[in-house]
Image (spheres, helix red, strand yellow):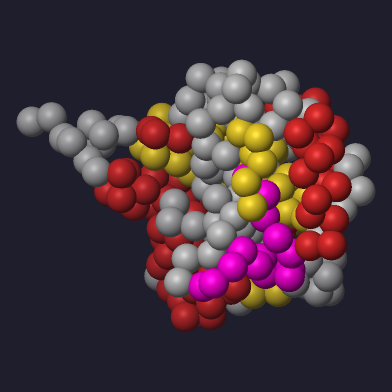
């Protein structure tokens, strides 16, 4: 009988599947330093990693979390958490596992829907291997025109940064909080602008151009560390590319 998995079911499937496959492929093994991402797709992978630590498959795992959300989850699940600066990590990771908001055919990404893009990029770009887990809705033909690109900015630079981003062809919206009056404040104390283009930009070029703007902290295009991508589908299959 044909399955018809919901988006939430796809997220649960791909997180568990990816961790188990990476263990089987000997790409996750005891003693590794692993970056753990943020959001509803990354959490099932975090939970599965904790299960494999608990059952004795993995030992001596050192994790770096990309947000308060993930740090708290790791603490509750018994995964040891360190900062990138801790001597146990030494500023370098063996592997990073995270979700994505959009993935194009070149495996370039938009990330940061959960406003954790700065730490997510620090982790992803300082890892030997980068793995993305996603449901099928995230696998798209182009990025930057449907799901807004997050850009983390210094609050005092809001107006000049918006003007500079508009010169790059983007429409900018200051992200507002939910159940909080006023704008979203990131874990780092900054603001988030959400950007859209009428036609798909060159993501790699735009990643570099945006970060040249004074007052920009980081943006959500991830084009430099090309990941392995696991995508779950409604029929219950998972593809790896």
Residue 181 covered by magenta stretch: yes
Residue at image location 73% in from the left, 26% down from the top: 169
**Which residues lie in the magenta part?**
180-194
Q: Is residue 148 above or below residue 192?
A: above
Q: Residue 178 placed where, x, y %?
A: 47, 66
Where is residue 131, by image quadrant? top right
Predominant SS along the magenta part: loop
Q: How many marks?
A: 0
- Front residue of 121/183: it is 183
- Front residue of 21/93: it is 93
Q: Quadrant of the N terminus?
A: top left
Q: Residue 51 placed where, x, y %?
A: 41, 67
Where is residue 211, by image quadrant? top right
Residue at image location 46% in from the left, 76% down from the top: 77
Residue at image location 74% in from the left, 68% down from the top: 188
Let me know if residue 155 appears in the view. yes
Residue 167 covered by magenta stretch: no
Q: Is residue 127 above or below residue 139?
A: below
Q: Residue 46 placed where, x, y %?
A: 48, 62
Q: In the figure, is residue 63 to the left or right of 188?
A: left
Q: Residue 164 placed where, x, y %?
A: 84, 38
Q: In the figure, is residue 219 to the left or right of 100?
A: right
Q: Is residue 162 above or below residue 79?
A: above
């Amino acid at each position: 009988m044909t399955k018809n998995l919901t988006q939430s079911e796809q997220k649960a499937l791909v997180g568990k599947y990816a961790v188990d496959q990476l263990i089987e492929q000997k790409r996750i093994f005891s003693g590794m330093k692993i970056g753990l991402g943020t959001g509803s797709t990354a959490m099932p992978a975090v939970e599965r990693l904790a299960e494999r630590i608990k059952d004795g498959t993995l030992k001596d795992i050192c994790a770096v979390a990309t947000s308060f959300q993930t740090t708290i989850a790791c603490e509750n699940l018994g995964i040891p958490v360190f900062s990138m600066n801790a001597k146990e990590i030494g500023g370098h990771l063996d592997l990073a596992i995270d979700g994505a908001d959009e993935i194009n055919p070149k495996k370039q990404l938009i990330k940061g829907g959960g406003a954790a893009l700065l730490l997510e990029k620090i982790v992803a770009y300082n890892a030997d291997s980068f793995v993305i887990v996603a449901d099928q809705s995230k696998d798209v033909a182009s990025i930057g025109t449907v799901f807004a690109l997050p850009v983390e900015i210094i609050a005092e630079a809001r107006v000049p940064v918006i003007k500079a981003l508009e010169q790059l062809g983007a429409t900018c919206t200051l992200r507002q909080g939910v159940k909080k009056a006023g704008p979203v404040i990131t874990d780092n104390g900054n603001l988030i602008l959400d950007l859209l283009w009428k036609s798909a930009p060159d993501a790699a070029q735009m990643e570099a151009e945006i970060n040249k703007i004074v007052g920009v902290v980081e943006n959500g295009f991830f084009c430099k560390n090309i990941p392995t991508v696991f995508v779950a589908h409604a029929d219950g299959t998972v593809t790896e590319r």
